[in-house]
Amino acid sequence: MLLAVEDISMQFGGLRALDKVSFGMKSGQIFGLIGPNGSGKTTLANIISGFLKPSSGRVLFEGQEMQGKPPHVIAEAGLCRTFQITLNPRRMTVMENMLLGAARQTGENIVSAMLQSRQVAREEERNLERARDLLEMVGLQRHADELAGSLSGGQKKLLALVQVLMAEPKLILLDEPVAGVNPRLIEDIVAVILQLRRAGHNFFIIEHNMQVVRRLCDEICVLDMGNVLAQGAPDEVLAREDVLQAYIASGGVAGEGVQA
């Protein structure tokens, strides 16, 4: 099992946001986490990625316990994430943002940078080459020298995705990768994710767009009011009456083409 969530509970004062949530995903999957607004998806994502410590339960990544570890330690282990609202520094160029994502750089240590200047130079050249290749893959190469803040919403999502790839992650957690993105760029984002999946990348996706969920995910887990309501193949899970009722009760419908 690549990622296992075991009996995760989260209490905020008198509010129980998650109640003994358990599921697992295998390597080679695109795994989706869905649910009505307020169901606990973001809280769980923050626990998995180290931004929150659960009240109880375990998160296992490649068999190692991760709950309570800081985000940078979890990222160094190979579990990296993007955010619903992209956090790329707006006043840095697209290329500078890409180079920020490169992991384990010798030049990050002042002493190593002084004593191993040739090694630093080689790493910098490799990182530049990789960044150029990734930007070309998502059609952002011509924007490399532009400020990240000048990109459209969809382009920022693509930048966040390929910046994560600079760290060579084993699992990428995408928080609403197509939220607020125009339909044409949604197609681009979906195509990139599928291309990366064919190249061997694993994805854990939180998403409201059910068309995208159906197209991308091998398996999904549905949260409702902090509990696991269903888990399985998307078409089977989204046809369940209790899942439909959960979305209807929240003001949405988990149907084809609906932002649920």
Image (tube, rainbow, N blue to C red):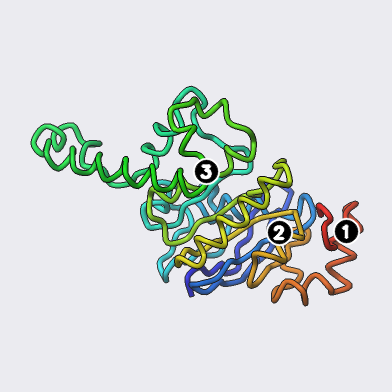
The residue identified by callout 1 is 253
Q: Which mark is residue 139?
A: 3
Q: Closer to the camera, 159 or 234?
A: 159
Quarter of image, res 230: bottom right
At 45% from the left edge and 56% from the top edge, which residue is drawn? Answer: 79
Give the structural element (helix, strand or loop) at label 3.
Answer: loop
- Of the 4 image quadrants, the one containing the C terminus is bottom right
List the single residue furthest toward the left: 115
Q: Is residue 148 left or right of residue 178?
A: left
Q: Residue furthest front?
A: 142
Q: Which residue is mark 2?
A: 212
- Which residue sits at x=30%, y=43%? 127
Of callouts 3 and 2, which one flags the residue occurring earlier in the amino acid sequence?
3
In the image, residue 149 sits, relative to residue 113, either above or below, namely above
Mark 1 vs mark 2, foreground winner is: 2
Are the residues tagged 3 and 2 within 8 Å (C-beta)? no
Which x, y percent locates residue 118? Answer: 11, 39
* Structural crowding at the residue carrying mark 2, measured as other residues with C-alpha within 10 Å and reported as few (<14), some (14–19) or many (≥20): some
